[in-house]
Amino acid sequence: MPQPSHIDRTDRADRADRAGDVLAVVSQSGPTVSFFDAADDRHLDTVEILAEPHELCFDPTRRLLWCSSAYHSGYYHANSGRRTELTVIDADTRRIVDVIDLAPEHGPHGLALDAARGRLYVSVEGGEDRPGGVVVIDTETRRPLGRIDTDAPGPHWFAISPDGRTGFATNKEAPFVSVVDLDKGVLTAKVEVPGSEGLAVSPDGTRVYAAGPYLSTTTAPGAAPGIRVIDVPTATVTAVLPTDSPALPVHLTSTGRLLAGEVRLAPDPENALGRQLTGRLTVFAADDHRRLGSVEVGLFPLTITSSPDGALAYVASVVSSTVDVIDLATLTPVSRLTIPKLADPGAHGLAYLPRPA
């Protein structure tokens, strides 16, 4: 298998402060999770896992990395069948320690961790007899505890409030964001959004930022692309932060910067969605919603994370199978990681793993 590579673009002395920190990156068609030194981008290791890994979630308490595998091949609405497994990897030895089968649940995708309560929430797709929902897993026993319906066929991305009491699922096809009470295990609200993609929750839990509409030529025609700002107490959209192109991933840094990955397309008669152009990372101030700027990234940005200090953004682009490292103070590229893939799709889920205390 080809090894991951990187291209240094600038020399940042402060990256030495990240010695021992690790970036983990999924390749959907690898199918692999690759590990890189966060200080100098050196490739450290690659773990081969079940087909079609999607998202990653790091449990800092147990030093475990959770990975969802959604399909046997392909992607949402264009796959050869849904998988049912989660893979658990020891973050330090980089070895698989468990594979959890959620059957009959299928299509696991979004992952959200409540470390204080020892709960992992996994969004799963619906079927003919039941809508999509969220499976609750005990992170100590690594076994399912229950399921919460979200009343939509395909809840894809999931996030929780900082206090661990409320969950939010975005729905590609359904015209709403699902709000669930995690203590009671019930759906409590539907916030009108014309098909939604990625999301992030504010540190005080009063706002949710959801990208929309769903990237499709048939969903919500005429709906302007942007980030919907949801007021959680009233379950209403109070503002739309406009983006030039459809946005998919959304991420909120520790320093209050709201990051959105824009997918840019050109008309293509052979492809309904169009021909891929260079993607864009657009940055807003979360407090007053000012647009702070943007920078070009790879083709079809699909996942974003950041360093714990909020200085660096990491943008995984699934078509180019790259991860762009961006200096958020200057909005300039720092480096680019190239993630091996056997076919499309490529780079997807990301997780930043701080070194052990």
Image: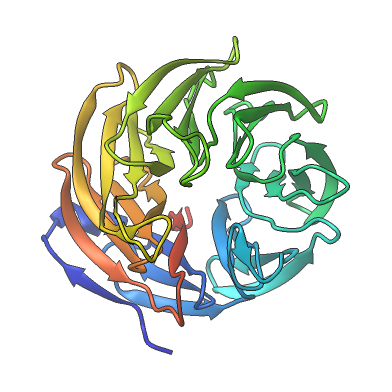
The answer to whether one can see residue 60 in this image is yes
The image shows residue 48, relative to residue 22, as above or below, that is below
Residue 132 lies left or right of residue 33; in this view the side is right
Observer-nearest of 334 and 222: 222
Left or right relative to 245: residue 58? right
- Residue 284, how many percent across, how many down? 28, 29
Name the outermost residue toward the left.
Answer: 10
Q: Where in the figure is residue 306, as x and y percent of width and height? A: 36, 47
Task: Tell me residue 331's x, y (percent).
Answer: 17, 43
> Can you say whether 143 is above or below 221 in the image?
below
Name the outermost residue toward the front. Answer: 269
Classify residue 98 by image quadrant: bottom right
Q: State the residue lying farthest toward the top.
A: 234
Image coords of residue 113 (percent x, y): 62, 44
Picture residue at 46% right of the left edge, 61% below the top: 348
Q: What residue lies at 55% left-to-right and 74% top-to-bottom?
A: 93
Look at 75% across and 44% down and name the residue there: 132
